[in-house]
Image (tube, rainbow, N blue to C red):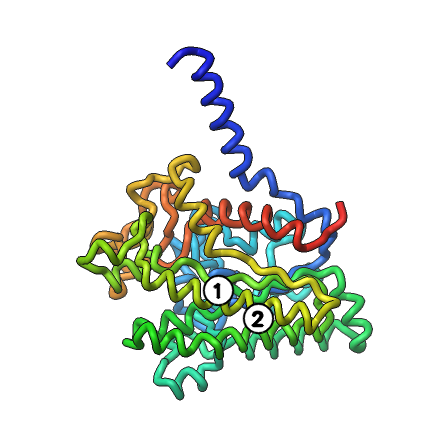
């Protein structure tokens, strides 16, 4: 390769890296001048509620949190989550979990109501369909009740709440993934799971309506991940037929389920925008943020041989098994989590979340209609 061509290639690589780098968008949300963030959701965004409900949860001990906090905080990763990177971009401190009563004084910047293992549908409704929620009884509805109690405590009346929440960012999700996870791993067919989706999406839609009723003016509603790319599903639904997999070696059928949920959710958001014209409601495209991560894995410094293996896990082609998960005795942790996309076979590494958050911020920023 001659010097001129090499220089052009290096410039191109540099530009791609700059465009991909989350640091390019790291502080961009500061222009929105949010003074608080309120989060509803599940393990993708829980910063410590589940471990206060269940102190024996593996998320409450190392190796969870080892690469940022040096100790477990209840985050289902080796470090920070997407909500943490969103907080950094807004200039707001990391969100304290609602159940952390010791942090009452720091809640002026928002609260995290998300609970790992939480479902969009109430557990009683799932049980009627023979789906058990084994991790927590705290569904989206209960999180909304917590939120209502919290706002009742900080607002004098509804008008006061509207003033206080006008400059807040609300995250409604990701939620609903566990409704499908539990159903699929408890033997429900793909068609049975598809039949659940309108109810799950309606629960999310109702939640958005409720938070806007509290006074929310900017709401992000994230969709589901391409679940067929995750070690838990690649292991549990492994196929001998090459046609079952796409170019990323993700399971097509499972990803089609996620796409169907996301399409229903996007349709619901369009309806919400019509019904709630005074609120800005934005779809958070976690699905394509994750695929972008896989597309650019090598360029971003991930080990392309390990993009679908768990860093913390053991067994099979994907270093994952349901019977010996991360945090259990004898389950190893990889030497460099930054080489991996998946942390524990279900959740992602801090580095993966960082790049997903950067991609997400880049695409949602114009829709939030912030004034620089």
Q: Nearer the viewer, residue 150 or 52?
A: 150
Q: On the picture, is 156 further left or further right than 126?
A: right
Residue sitting at 34 percent across and 39 percent down?
A: 303
| Identity of the residue furthest to the left in this view | 240
- As displayed, is residue 167 above or below residue 133? above
Residue sitting at 66 percent across and 68 percent down?
A: 273
Q: Which residue is mark 1?
A: 262
Q: Nearer the viewer, residue 45 or 249?
A: 249
Residue 317 is marked as none
The N terminus is located in which quarter?
top left
Residue 268 is marked as 2
| Identity of the residue furthest to the top in this view | 3
How far apart in space, not on screen, are marks 1 and 2 (Cα)? 10 Å
| Mark 1 nearby-residue class (10 Å; few <14, some 14–19, many ≥20) | many
1 and 2 marks in contact (CB < 8 Å): no
Badge 1 marks a residue whose secondary structure is helix
Q: Position of residue 194 (x, y in %)?
A: 39, 74
Residue sitting at 50 percent across and 62 percent down?
A: 223
Q: Position of residue 58 (x, y in %)?
A: 38, 63
Q: Position of residue 233 (x, y in %)?
A: 31, 61
- Tally of numbered discs: 2
| Mark 2 nearby-residue class (10 Å; few <14, some 14–19, many ≥20) | some
Q: Nearer the viewer, residue 255 or 105?
A: 255
Badge 2 marks a residue whose secondary structure is helix
Q: Quadrant of residue 147?
A: bottom right
Residue sitting at 19 percent across and 57 percent down?
A: 241
Q: Position of residue 120 (x, y in %)?
A: 49, 74
Q: Nearer the viewer, residue 352 or 299?
A: 299
């Amino acid at each position: 390769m001659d010097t001129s061509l090499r220089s052009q290639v290096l410039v191109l690589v540099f530009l791609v890296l700059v465009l991909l780098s989350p640091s390019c968008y790291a502080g961009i949300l500061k222009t929105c001048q949010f003074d608080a963030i309120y989060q509803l959701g599940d393990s993708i965004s829980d910063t410590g509620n589940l471990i206060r409900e269940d102190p024996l949860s593996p998320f409450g001990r190392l190796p969870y949190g080892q690469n940022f906090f040096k100790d477990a905080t209840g985050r289902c990763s080796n470090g920070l989550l997407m909500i943490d990177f969103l907080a950094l971009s807004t200039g707001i401190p990391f969100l304290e979990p609602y159940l952390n009563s010791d942090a009452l004084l720091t809640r002026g910047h928002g609260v995290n109501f998300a609970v790992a293992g939480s479902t969009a549908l109430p557990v009683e409704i799932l049980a009627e369909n023979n789906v058990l929620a084994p991790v927590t009884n705290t569904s989206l509805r209960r999180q909304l009740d917590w939120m209502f109690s919290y706002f009742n405590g900080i607002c004098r009346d509804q008008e006061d709440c509207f003033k206080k929440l006008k400059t807040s960012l609300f995250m409604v999700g990701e939620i609903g993934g566990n409704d499908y996870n539990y159903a699929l791993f408890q033997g429900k067919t793909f068609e049975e799971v598809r039949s659940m989706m309108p109810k799950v999406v309606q629960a999310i839609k109702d939640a958005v309506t409720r938070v806007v009723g509290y006074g929310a003016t900017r709401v992000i509603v994230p969709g589901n991940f391409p679940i067929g790319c995750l070690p838990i599903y690649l292991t549990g639904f492994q196929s001998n037929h090459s046609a079952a997999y796409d170019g990323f070696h993700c399971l097509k059928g499972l990803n089609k389920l996620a796409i169907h949920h996301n399409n229903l959710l996007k349709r619901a958001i369009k309806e919400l925008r019509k019904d709630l014209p005074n609120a800005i409601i934005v779809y958070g495209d976690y699905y394509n943020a994750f695929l972008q991560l896989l597309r650019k894995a090598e360029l971003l410094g991930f080990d392309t041989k390990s993009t679908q293996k768990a860093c913390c896990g053991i067994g099979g082609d994907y270093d994952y098994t349901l019977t010996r998960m991360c945090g259990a005795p004898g389950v190893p942790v990889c030497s460099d989590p930054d080489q991996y996309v998946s942390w524990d076979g279900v959740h992602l590494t801090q580095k993966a979340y960082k790049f997903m958050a950067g991609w997400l911020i880049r695409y949602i920023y114009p829709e939030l209609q912030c004034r620089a």
